[in-house]
Image (cartoon, rainbow, N blue to C red):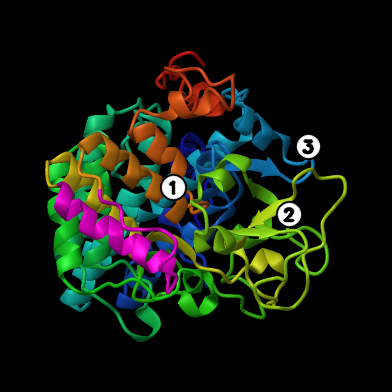
Amino acid sequence: MKSIIPTLLAVLLLVAASCNEVLDRTPQGEYTLGNFFRTEEQAVQSVNAVYNQLRQWQTHVFSFIGMTDIVSDDADKGSFTSDGFFLQEIDDFTYTSTNTAPATVWGGYYTGVFRSNLAITRIPEVVDMDETLRTRLIGEARFLRAYYYFNLVRWFGDVPLILDPFPAVFEIPRTPRDEVYAQIEADLRAAADALPESYSGVDVGRATSGAAKSLLAKVALTRGNHQTAADLALEVINSGRYSLLPSFAQIFTLEGENSSESIFEVQAAAFEIGGGGSQYNEVQGVRGVPNLGWGFNKPSDNLIAAFEPGDPRREATILYVGEVLPDGSAIVVGDDNIVGERFNQKAFVPDHPGGNGNGPGNIRIFRYADLLLIAAEALNEIGQPEQALVYLNQVRARARGGNANVLPDVTATDRTALRAAILHERRVELALEQHRWFDLVRTNRAAEVMQPLRPNFTPGKNELFPIPQTEIDLSQGALQQNPNY
């Protein structure tokens, strides 16, 4: 299925202009709305198309990294000063509503919403189909729709909530974020009921009930519903389905993909003919021979200073000039024209077919350590610090490995002190995995943390990104801009 949609309004206008022709004609050898969703295989393909959008440039690559890591205190833009200047504007908080990054992810995530909506509304129409599979596929599509909307609402606040692939009108206003969150929660609860606990064979990597419940816990934490977040996180933890890998560094190798620690990952593979990889690895890769990456998302001085003395996670997270590449193939050679050059080691992948744009590294969206820290944070907020310490210290114990001289257990039970310890642990454990900005905003610390580092940060403005100006123009006034843009 092909549904490459650059903007929300553009796709709706395109559909309106071509729908009658598509339905009235049946070109030989082509799929149309009239001849698709006839078979079980086509139902599967429609959901595969929703997953496929997760690997795309608009969804999880350049702008996504800019609006999660580079915008935060974890990373600087990297590369040369003039290279990817729109990301420098993100880094400096000088961006406007015409910046490329918000427009890119808006288009990418609404493409995912469109594909999800199409699968959710049309799979029930497939006549001859296994009912268990039908239920599962709709559950997967609802999980993915919830994920797409979760990032949209966290980036932009109120966003158009569209549940029909072909709405009757094109000028769709923004929906209050509480209504968007209500739909996200409804989708995730339905997915949790519909999805299996695990998969085998070629289906490994699809959304599971545990993934739906875990994401629902994160949504609850984001909204300050700490009891719900704790209940959901503990339900998944107590299921015994997931466990921490013994080695932190192992998580980010090809061997660590879809491991016991994986709750949800974007699947990628470097086939000889391409089509299965992404550019997520390339844009963060070491510049120059032999890695041929772009060198963006440079770990910041502030992040380096955040690691406690001896924390092995620092070396597993940051790849320095002069260091041997993780696969032992070469030494990182620096560029004298780039100050403080270093790289995100978690995004490294070894040599593979199809060039760097065909990166085989799975994108870790949600892993078990994240869930443990969600449980710890929620439990602390509802007055159960001793239980919170159990899950916090599990993460620290794995990180220290066999070295008892580093990362001692946290013992603080004062709510404020323990909150700070948990949020610090989230930062160093999940560094450069695209969580930091969302954590700063949801805990109302973005201004406190960013203003000393980026004086252009404006409270009441930069916690949200601007609605892309192109979308506002196309909406003929239906979309209103976020404050102060």
Of the numbered discs 1 and 3, the one sitting upstream in the chain is 3
Q: Is residue 120 above or below residue 241?
A: above
Residue 158 in the figure: left or right of residue 451: left
Q: Nearer the viewer, mark 1 or mark 3?
A: 1
Q: Give residue 185's mark.
A: none
Q: Is residue 46 magenta?
A: no
Determine crowd level at label 2: few under 14, some 14-19, many 20+ residues with C-alpha closer than 10 A.
Answer: many
Judging by the rendered image, the residue that carries numbered circle 2 is 294
User: Which amino acid, mark 2?
Assistant: Trp
Residue 469 position, x and y percent, is 55, 24
Task: Spot the residue most to the bottom.
Answer: 201
Among all residues in the image, which is located at the extreme right?
Answer: 336
* Residue located 40% across and 20% down the image: 478
Q: Earlier in the sequence, mark 2 or mark 1?
A: 2
Residue type, label 3 = Thr
What's the residue type where badge 1 is placed? Arg
Residue 103 relative to residue 398: left or right: right
Cβ atoms at labels 2 and 3 below 8 Å apart: no
Camera-nearest residue between 13 and 155: 155
Q: Secondary structure at mark 2?
A: loop
* Label 2 vs 3, first from the N-terminus: 3
Q: Which mark is residue 427?
A: 1
- Asked whether 245 or 351 is in front, the reply is 245
The residue most toward the top is 484
Q: Is residue 127 visible?
A: no
Q: At which x and y percent is residue 442?
A: 34, 34
Q: Which mark is residue 81?
A: 3
Q: Residue at coordinates 30% horizontally, 44% vertically from top-left?
A: 164
> Which residue is rendered at x = 32% and y = 59% of the image?
119
- Specify start and end residues of the magenta stretch as a single range: 385-411
As displayed, is residue 51 above or below residue 336?
below
